[in-house]
Amino acid sequence: MNDVKLFGPADSAGIVSFLIDTIHPHDLGTILDEENVAIRAGHHCAQPLMATLGVTATARASFGIYSDDKDVAALIRGIERTKRIFG
């Protein structure tokens, strides 16, 4: 997905912060919630970092020991649906 911008180190230990060019993270979070996919959206108590990065908010997905390929697929499907909705 060329329009998804990732933030953070490559070894982020299962936490992925990202933005989609034309979609606010809160809008993404709302639509993903309809798909039963939970993410965090906002400034994550890191306003100075967000200002340095030049963004107002990011979306953040977290993967843990119980996450599997189905969870990743659901996130991708939800992102694709959101992109279709927002054109």
Image (cartoon, rainbow, N blue to C red):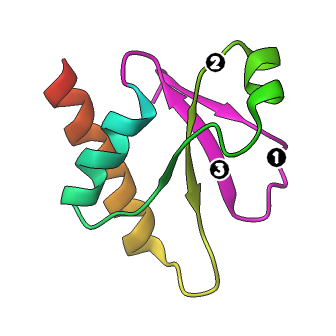
Going by the numbered disc 1, the residue's amino acid type is Ala
**Which of 66 and 46 lies nearest the eye of the viewer?**
46
Q: Which residue is mark 3?
A: 16
Residue projecting furthest to the left: 85
Give how far across and how far down residue 60 sits, in percent.
57, 49
Give how far across and how far down residue 85 sits, in percent.
14, 29
The Cα–Cα distance between marks 1 and 2, rounded to whole angstroms, is 20 Å
Q: Can you say whether 59 is above or below 23 in the image?
A: below
The Cα–Cα distance between marks 3 and 2, rounded to whole angstroms, is 16 Å
Q: Which residues are magenta?
A: 1-23
Numbered label attached to residue 55: 2
Q: Which residue is mark 1?
A: 10
Dots 3 and 1: beta carbons under 8 Å?
Answer: no
Going by the numbered disc 2, the residue's amino acid type is Val
Instruction: Tell which circle, 3 or 2, labels the residue nearer the N-terminal end.
Output: 3
Instruction: Tell which circle, 3 or 1, labels the residue nearer the N-terminal end.
Output: 1
Q: Is residue 14 left or right of residue 8?
A: left
Going by the numbered disc 3, the residue's amino acid type is Val
Residue projecting furthest to the top: 54
Residue at 34% over, 63% down: 37
Residue at 64% over, 18% down: 55
Give how far across and how far down residue 87 sits, in percent.
18, 17
